């Protein structure tokens, strides 16, 4: 069963890379000193993708120093899309949650 889950994740990642070339654009690390969150942007042709990954078991809120995230949409997540929460430039991530925004 776990191989099926990994296969679905890999399929989703490949689909995301094909649909959104921004994942190959210019890289900018957002929280280089954060212990639990790995967050960065990739920009290409005026469009920016945001990747945020929480590597802890705890829910966490982080200010990414970006403008309002509500204008972006979640294109990949390991949780139900309807539960992604943002407030201004602050992002709330659950334990081991990862999201990609475009």
Image (cartoon, rainbow, N blue to C red):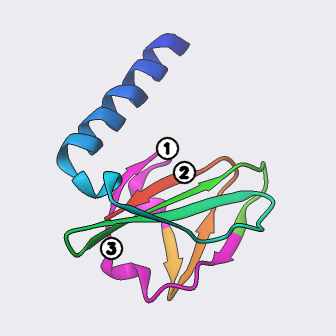
Residue 34 position (above or below residue 76): below
* Precedes in sequence: disc 3 or disc 1: 3
> Do the residues bearing badges 3 and 1 touch, measured as CB atoms within 8 Å?
no
Disc 3 is placed on an element classified as loop
**What residue is shown at x 69% (from left), y 60% (from top)?**
37
- For discs 2 and 1, the disc positioned in front in the rendered view: 2
Residue marked by disc 3: 72
Disc 1 is placed on an element classified as loop
**What residue is shown at x 76% (from left), y 66% (from top)?**
34
The number of callouts visible is 3
**What residue is shown at x 28% (from left), y 44% (from top)?**
16
Please indicate whether residue 30 sits to the left or right of residue 25 in the image: right
Residue 81 position (above or below residue 32): above
Determine the image quadrant of residue 91: bottom right
What range of the chain is rendered magenta?
61-84
- For discs 3 and 1, the disc positioned in front in the rendered view: 3
Q: Residues within 10 Å of mark 1 (few under 14, many from 20)?
A: few
Q: Is residue 72 magenta?
A: yes
- Which of the pair 44/74 is nearer the observer? 44
Q: Residues within 10 Å of mark 2 (few under 14, many from 20)?
A: some
Instruction: Quote the CA–CA distance across marks 3 and 1.
Output: 17 Å
* Precedes in sequence: disc 2 or disc 1: 1
Instruction: Quote the CA–CA distance across marks 2 and 3.
Output: 15 Å
Please indicate whether residue 33 sits to the left or right of residue 43 in the image: right
* Precedes in sequence: disc 2 or disc 3: 3
Residue marked by disc 2: 98
- Which of the pair 48/73 is nearer the observer? 48
Residue 27 position (above or below residue 86): above
Residue marked by disc 1: 78
């Amino acid at each position: 069963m776990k191989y099926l889950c990994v296969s679905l994740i890999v399929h989703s990642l490949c689909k995301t890379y094909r649909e959104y070339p921004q994942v190959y654009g210019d890289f900018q690390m957002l929280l280089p000193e954060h212990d639990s969150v790995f967050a960065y942007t990739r920009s290409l042709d005026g469009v920016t993708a945001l990747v945020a990954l929480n590597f802890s078991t705890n829910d966490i809120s982080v200010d990414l120093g970006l403008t309002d995230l509500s204008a972006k949409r979640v294109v990949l997540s390991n949780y139900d899309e309807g539960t992604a929460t943002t407030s201004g430039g602050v992002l709330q991530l659950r334990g081991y949650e990862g999201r990609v925004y475009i």
